[in-house]
Amino acid sequence: MYLIASPKKLAPIARDFWAFLMSLEAQKLVQDLGFESRTPLEVKFDGSAGIILKSVLNTDADMRADDLRNAIQRFARI
């Protein structure tokens, strides 16, 4: 469980606990207990998924969502 609060407003012991919760060590314990870990995973996007991801990340900031959606739909038909 994650609590949403500003770390600056928490007592020192609560800040330390919050820092521990976000650590890889704590997430390993969570995973070992059978719960979902929030540890970031590195995922490789190969093939068409990689091409789509790169095209989305390299779009112009002014590109409309409809234009992007249409481009991806056209790519999916290829």
Image: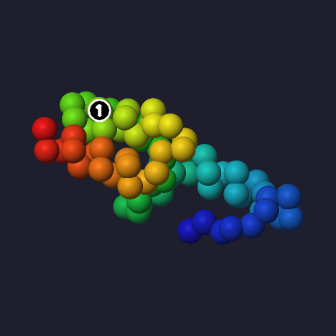
Q: Quadrant of residue 58?
A: top left
Please, what is the three-letter code of the amino acid marked with disc 1? Ile
Percent across and percent down for residue 38 are 48, 53
Residue 43 in view (yes/no)? no
Q: Residue at x 66, y 51 (%)?
A: 20
Tell me where residue 68 appears, x and y as whole percent.
37, 47
Q: Residue 1 location, x and y as percent?
A: 56, 68
Q: Residue at x 25, y 30 (%)?
A: 46
Find residue 22 and report its horizontal and vertical position in percent: 62, 51
Q: Quadrant of the C terminus?
A: top left
Q: Which color mode does the image show?
A: rainbow
Which of these two is toward me, 44 or 55? 55
Q: Is 3 on the left-hand or right-hand side of 15?
A: left
Q: Which residue is mark 1?
A: 51
Q: Secondary structure at mark 1?
A: helix
Which class describes the residues within 10 Å of circle 1: few (<14), some (14-19), or many (20+)? some
> In terms of image quadrants, where is residue 45?
top left
- Left or right side of 46 for 65: right
**At x 21% / y 40%, what residue is drawn?**
75
Q: Identify the image quadrant of residue 2.
A: bottom right
Q: Is residue 20 left or right of residue 58?
A: right
